Amino acid sequence: MQAIQNFNLPSLLDTFVSVAVAFTLGSLIGLERQIRQRAAGLRTNTLVAVGAAVFVDMANRLHGHDGAVHVAAYVVSGIGFLGAGAIMKEGTNITGLNTAATLWGSAAVGACAGADLIGEAMIAAMFVLASNTLLLPVVNRINRRPINEESSEATYTVRVICSRAARPDVMDQLLLLLEAANYPVRDVDQHAFGPADTEIEATLYATAVEPLELDQVITELEALNGVQQAFWNASAED
């Protein structure tokens, strides 16, 4: 009997409108992701938006605005866990951040729709779509530009491959040359490289470098007796 008493046609129509709006807007966000063949595509973003709308709408009906606010907070944290599952780290490469952020945006759209803030849901969906479409050419253009080593922040490493017999002298010269170039060494590691050689790896304190200065250090290292190869590289800061 309680189910019959809770059957309220105006309230049911209100829920239908909220969920339908969440479904439509979530589908638009997901369609763009599906076209780009992302991990979370049409169905995932639609379900996230619809689920958020249903939870918030239910809380709004049972406990009013206070209940909707509390459930919306749980939706935010719950989608955070879902998004974390889409993020993958392989070495220094991290993928899935944009997918996780888009899911978060879809949940926000659904929560607005569930709280009967239809206009706000449309605005949120518009900006989520704009972030994934209009900003993409900007990101691509920036990524195609050559990196300015003097202004970028990264972890810089100098590597030297030398014979094992020459390792002590090469190690000393490596530290002296870097110190003279004002690039103090934060950490030094060494390990076997083939049957008769050693690789020395020196990590610098500096987070920005002058490439010509390090190139000069490399040239001087390669001139040392017993050195087969010397080079430096950079990896993105965590």
Image: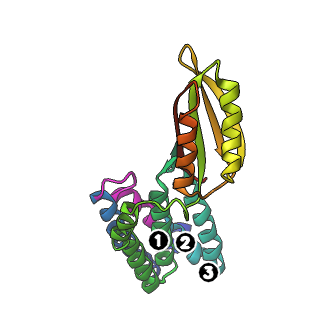
Q: CA distance from mark 3 to mark 2?
A: 10 Å
Residue 200 x, y percent position in the rendering: 62, 31
Which numbered disc, 1 or 3, marks the residue that appears first in the sequence?
3
Q: Are marks 1 and 2 in contact (CB under 8 Å)?
A: yes
Residue 118 x, y percent position in the rendering: 43, 83
Q: CA distance from mark 1 to mark 2?
A: 8 Å
Can I make out residue 31 in this image? yes
Residue indicated by mark 3 = 64
Which three-letter amino acid code belongs to the residue tagged 3? Answer: Gly
Q: CA distance from mark 1 to mark 3?
A: 17 Å
Along the line of sight, which residue is nearer the eye, 31 or 160?
A: 160
* Numbered disc 3: secondary structure: helix
**1 vs 3, front mark:** 1
- Image: magenta residue range: 36-51
Question: Which of the labelled discs sits on residue 110, or is there none?
Answer: 1
Task: Name the residue at the bottom extreme.
Answer: 119
Residue indicated by mark 2 = 56
Instruction: Please name the residue shown 57% across and 33% down the image.
Output: 160
Q: Quadrant of residue 161?
A: top right
Along the line of sight, which residue is nearer the eye, 145 or 214?
A: 214
The magenta stretch spans residue 40: yes
The magenta stretch spans residue 118: no
Residue 81 x, y percent position in the rendering: 58, 54
